[in-house]
Amino acid sequence: RTSTRQESSLVSNPISNQLILNLSQVFDEQVDIAIFSSSGQILLQDKYWATGEPINVTVKHLPEGVYYLQIIRKEMVETIPFSKI
């Protein structure tokens, strides 16, 4: 099931080196995170354990541009666009 309500947010946007993701009301749950280019290519994919603290993802290797952060949790998929500067 895909939810349309947004339960996640980025601490800042645009982003330079570190993407900091706040997951509201997510505790003790595995979260799959992927970053896609504007053309749909998967550039990064990893699993994180949500503990209620922000999740830090290093994006300094990405060139400047527009990207999409996809967050997959139990019964929920969210996509958040962001800019890398």
Image: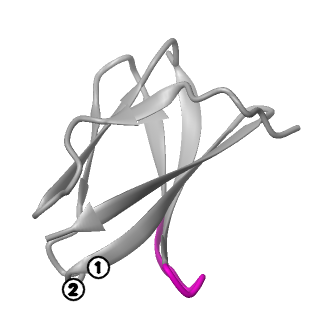
For image coordinates 56% across by 41% down, the residue present is 31
Mark 2 crowdedness (10 Å alpha carbons): few <14, some 14-19, many ≥20:
few
Give the residue type at disc 2. Answer: Pro
Tag 2–tag 1 contact (CB < 8 Å)? yes
User: Which mark identifies residue 65?
Assistant: 1
Quarter occupied by residue 2: top right
Above or below, 59 against 43 in this view is above
Q: Nearer the viewer, residue 73 or 12?
A: 12
Q: Quadrant of residue 44?
A: bottom left
Question: Per the image, is 39 magenta?
Answer: yes
How much space separates mark 2 and mark 1, taking CA atoms?
Answer: 6 Å
Question: What residue is drawn where x is 60% and y is 82%?
Answer: 40
Tag 1's secondary structure?
A: strand
Question: What residue lies at 41% left-to-right and 70% top-to-bottom?
Answer: 67
Residue 63's disc number: 2
Residue shown at 45%/44% (left/top)? 48
- Say which of marks 2 and 1 sits in front: 1
What quarter of the picture does the C terminus occupy? bottom left
Q: For the magenta stretch, what is the residue range? A: 38-45
| Residue 15 part of the magenta segment | no
Q: Amino acid at mark 1?
A: Gly
* Relative image position of residue 45 (x, y in whole percent): 50, 67
Q: Nearer the viewer, residue 30 or 13?
A: 13
Residue 37 sits above or below residue 6 on the image: below
